[in-house]
Amino acid sequence: MPTFKGYLETLKEIMHMPLTTADPEIPARRVTADYCARHFKTPPRNVTMLTRDFISDSLYNPAYGYFSKQALIFSPQKGYNFGEFRDSADFLSTMGRQYEEIEQELDDVRSIPRQLWHTPTEILKPWYGYSVARHIAQQYAEDRKNGVHNGPLVIYEVGGGNGTLMLNILDYLREYEPDMYNQTEYNLIEISPKLARQQLSRHASSSTLHGNARIINQSILDWDKHENRPCFVVAMEVIDNLAHDVVRYDYQTDTPYQALVHVFDDGEFEEIYEQVYDPLIREYLATRAQAAKKYRSPAQSSRLYRKLRSQLPLAPNLTRAEFVPTHAFRFVQVLGKHFPRHRIVLSDFYKLPDTVPNAVSAPVVQTRFDGTMVPCTTYLVQPGWFDIFFPTDFELLLQMYNHMCRTGASAPLGPARVCSQREFARKYAELPKTATRSGENPMLDFYENNKFLLS
């Protein structure tokens, strides 16, 4: 099978600029992220793996993954009284000081710096969680009225972070919908053992213990239990950290090629390409073609452009890279197969600054250095030290979700829809609770690069 390389790689070969000092004769084993999780306590060398396995291993390996070792979620001890702040800038200044204090404390007690990040669930608590709860309660009541739902309120939350959203949703239901709360089952599915333990501890120590909550330490991608009851699946800021694959297309034929990451024995990385044979990538591309018939990857140029480009000296034979969301696709497969009567409440980024350049749907790759978050220009970085997160094409996700999850028995639930963070907040949030004295409102003005997928 020939190896295809792009323009920069070709130039490097011509100019005799080696990418690594490693011995190219040392054979490399083909591995997966699951294999690495079972067999390696440090990042492996002399291996090759698909891009999604490299990213998944970097983020989730239990021994050295970013979420296992480096990442912490900023969580103030109690929610902010937004009416005390002059405006949004005053609020950000206060939050920034707290953020710096926590970072400094972490660095003082640990030999290596930890990375701290924030979510709308945490900085807008409990009101953000209350808005999600209000949406679920209204939809549940409407479904019961229409005969779609006649059982208990069953909720599955994926990737619960500190467990704050779970507590806020259950607190809201107990306070404002007691009858609904009394027949609620809440299941939190968490891949990280560390976060699962933290969620259990926080729930047990909460002043408002909820006996109807259950925490499951498992990846949603490995879920194999069938839930045939109507339920809600909640996934807030989850799919941005689901691993992607890299695909490039032949300029002449549009044939897709999948990327492999080769890790040399000196720890250096190289991308190599081969025709797509991976079943998940092939299934994703085929389903995308069926669900979104008018969609064409921005990486695939017009025939005229390809013809003109082929006339250039040293023209590459493959297009620029496209990051394809194979693990998010797998997540939707799990929903369709094991939660056939679910409604989805999903929120995430639809655009991001400082993404890896010259690629379609590229991630942000960043690490913290000297108190500052530093973006990188490649995802080929030391596993475990860098956050890697992706924007989501919500319009494409909507078409694929409806194609995969709104047919057959689930068709009566109706198609999904996409809305902005602002639209969701205007409909479901208690906006006076998050308004500053100037009238500026972080619930409306922050996270404007987020969208919701609702069904």
Image (cartoon, rainbow, N blue to C red):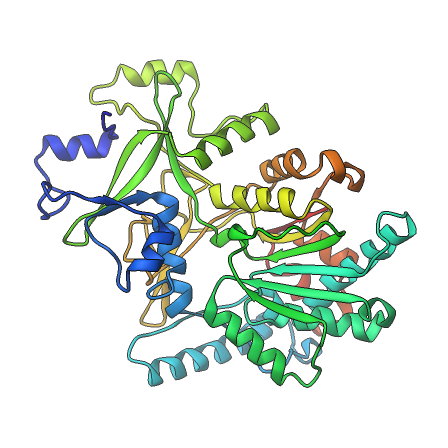
Can see residue 435?
no
In this image, 49 relative to 151: left or right?
A: left
Residue plotted at (31% across, 19% down): 309
| Coordinates of residue 184 in the picture (x, y in percent) | 77, 66
Q: In the current view of this chain or complex, which residue is farthest to the right?
A: 145
Q: In the current view of this chain or complex, which residue is farthest to the front?
A: 225
* Nearer to me, 189 or 70: 189
Can see residue 158?
yes
Compared with 389, 305 (above or below) is: above
In this image, 32 relative to 390: left or right?
A: left
| Coordinates of residue 118 in the picture (x, y in percent) | 52, 67
Report how many numbered discs are placed on residues in the image.
0
Compared with 117, 136 (above or below) is: above
Compared with 371, 253 (above or below) is: above
Residue plotted at (33% across, 15% down): 308
* Nearer to me, 39 or 374: 39
Residue plotted at (23% across, 25% down): 2
Place residue 410 in its image quadrant: top right
| Coordinates of residue 310 in the picture (x, y in percent) | 29, 16
Position of the N terminus by quadrant:
top left
